[in-house]
Image (cartoon, rainbow, N blue to C red):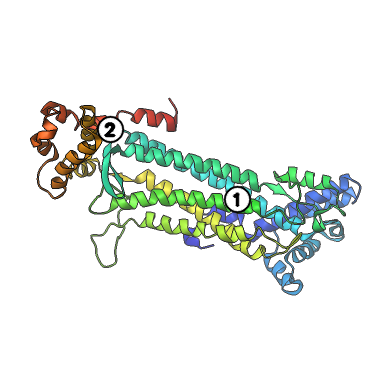
């Protein structure tokens, strides 16, 4: 965990104290279920809760024990016995380490997903507010980075909103995918523990029983989880890249908020750099880096090996912490984004009307000219404008082939920006609903 990119709420999920608390709850709930089944004394199960429910586990002590045992779960159980006393002998009856480790990891990933879904909700709210604010703010659309046809800045933000609606759905699915529990004992056969124990623990921990755990919860679930996080991160990068391009000096249609006292460069005092969205691009790369290791974790040996363990100790905290931070940062960027409609209009006008070329092309075909001839006529008048040699509408009016089919008034009508924004309401209704 790098403090620079870590929020407290997500970090707490991965703290050792939280992990040991979850381990204790898994063990204690399992002991409760065993008591109900008559396997362990009821007063022993009650004593375990009494001693452990408010305990602050000594992380240093557990580490000290693990240095000798070379086994983290045994180290924890040894420390728990120091807290609970003789009744601790009834803890972990019929269970194996993976029952604790895998169920705990899935609890942590489920809680992380809840925070990430909450983060996306905040970003969606910011995108919706700014989309409606700039619903009719006309700007140039670009394909290949080149001026194409007019759109609105609100549509750009509506597109992002629709994408993050899908991101939310993916996170909800990822949460459901990962929220399983395994309390099935060695090689997952329940030979030494009743399946009802697993059902009880699953219910108490907000999970569902894993159908076949083979001693470990299958890692295809985790692969899907981290893949979902990676797609959300890529959506963040897509939006961050758009803002970075719009902030370029030659474009400057939108810009990250630049706070009082902020400095853009150690060498050049005039600089206002898109540092937040560049940072988001980098964070997206970090989140995506978890996917290949997660996929490679799927192929474990037989009923269990631990080649996945060291991987997940890294990617679990890192991917969720980085995505949580990135979603919050992107929300702040959108919320305070500076938008410059006057620069958008200036850029729209830079090509002397060329952005209306398709309308002229279509109008000529409607008048009877073939598409090939229409394209050639429009293009031969467009290219001089690219070179700064005149105005597109003026050149079209002087072209004999064009003017033979389209009057000056008809040509002028084809240069109406409103034509390109007439379906904005339809697009917004699709994204935000009719209301």
Q: What SS does tag 2 mark?
A: helix
State whether residue 50 appears in this view: no
Density class for disc 2 (Cα within 10 Å; few <14, some 14-19, many ≥20) is some
Q: Using the rendered view, name the quadrant where residue 301 is placed.
A: bottom right
Q: Tell me residue 363's x, y (percent).
A: 22, 30
Looking at the figure, which quarter contains the N terminus? bottom right
Which mark is on residue 291?
Answer: none
Q: Residue at x 65, y 48 (%)?
A: 178
Work out whether 56 lies above or below 386. below
Left of 384 or right of it: where is 292?
Answer: right
Give the Cα distance between marks 2 and 1.
40 Å
Q: Residue 334 versus residue 89: which sits nearer the camera?
A: 334
Density class for disc 1 (Cα within 10 Å; few <14, some 14-19, many ≥20) is many
> In the rendered image, which residue does mark 2 sit on?
420
Q: Tell me residue 192's x, y (percent).
A: 87, 54
Left of 415 or right of it: where is 136?
Answer: right
Work out whether 320 lies above or below 161. below
Residue at the outermost bottom position: 68
Q: Residue at x 68, y 68 (%)?
A: 60
Q: Residue 165 versus residue 363: which sits nearer the camera?
A: 363
Q: Using the rendered view, name the quadrant where residue 172 is placed.
A: top right
> In the rendered image, which residue does mark 1 sit on?
224
Q: Using the rendered view, name the quadrant where residue 374 is placed.
A: top left
Q: Tell me residue 420's x, y (percent).
A: 27, 32
Q: Residue at x 76, y 50 (%)?
A: 212
Work out whether 262 lies above or below 151. below
């Amino acid at each position: 965990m790098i403090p620079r990119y870590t929020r407290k709420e997500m970090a707490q999920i991965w703290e050792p104290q939280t992990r040991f608390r979850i381990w204790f709850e898994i063990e204690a709930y399992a002991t409760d279920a065993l008591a109900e089944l008559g396997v362990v004394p009821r007063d022993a199960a009650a004593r375990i809760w009494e001693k452990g429910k408010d305990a602050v586990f000594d992380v240093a002590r557990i580490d000290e024990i693990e240095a000798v045992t070379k086994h983290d779960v045994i180290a924890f159980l040894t420390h728990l016995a120091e807290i609970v006393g003789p009744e601790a002998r009834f803890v972990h009856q019929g269970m194996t380490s993976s029952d604790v480790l895998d169920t705990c990891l899935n609890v942590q990933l489920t809680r992380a997903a809840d925070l990430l879904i909450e983060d996306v909700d905040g970003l969606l709210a910011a995108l919706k507010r700014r989309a409606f604010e700039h619903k009719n703010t006309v700007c140039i659309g670009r394909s290949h980075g080149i001026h194409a046809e007019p759109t609105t800045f609100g549509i750009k933000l509506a597109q992002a909103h629709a994408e993050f609606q899908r991101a939310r759905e993916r996170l909800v699915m990822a949460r459901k995918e990962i929220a399983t529990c395994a309390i099935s004992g060695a090689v997952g056969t329940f030979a030494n523990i009743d399946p009802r124990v697993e059902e009880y623990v699953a219910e108490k921990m907000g999970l569902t029983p894993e159908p076949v755990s083979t001693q470990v919860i299958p890692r295809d679930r985790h692969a899907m989880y981290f893949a979902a996080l990676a797609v959300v991160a890529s959506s963040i990068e897509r939006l961050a890249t758009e803002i970075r391009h719009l902030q370029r000096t030659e474009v400057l249609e939108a810009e990250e908020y630049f706070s009082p006292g902020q400095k853009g460069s150690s060498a050049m005092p005039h600089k206002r750099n898109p540092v937040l969205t560049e940072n988001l691009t980098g964070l997206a790369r970090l989140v995506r880096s978890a996917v290949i290791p997660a996929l490679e974790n799927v192929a474990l040996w037989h009923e269990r090996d631990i080649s996945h363990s060291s991987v997940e100790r890294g990617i679990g905290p890192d991917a969720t912490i980085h995505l949580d931070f990135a979603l919050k940062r992107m929300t702040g960027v959108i919320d305070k984004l500076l938008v410059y409609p006057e620069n958008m209009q200036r850029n729209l006008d830079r090509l002397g009307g060329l952005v209306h070329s398709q309308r002229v092309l279509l109008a000529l075909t409607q008048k009877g000219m073939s598409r090939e001839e229409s394209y050639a006529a429009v293009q031969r008048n467009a290219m001089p404008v690219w070179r700064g040699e005149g105005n597109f509408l003026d050149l079209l009016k002087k072209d004999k082939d064009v003017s033979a089919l389209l009057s000056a008034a008809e040509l002028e009508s084809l240069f109406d920006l409103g034509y390109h924004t007439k379906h904005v309401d339809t697009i917004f209704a699709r994204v935000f609903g009719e209301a």
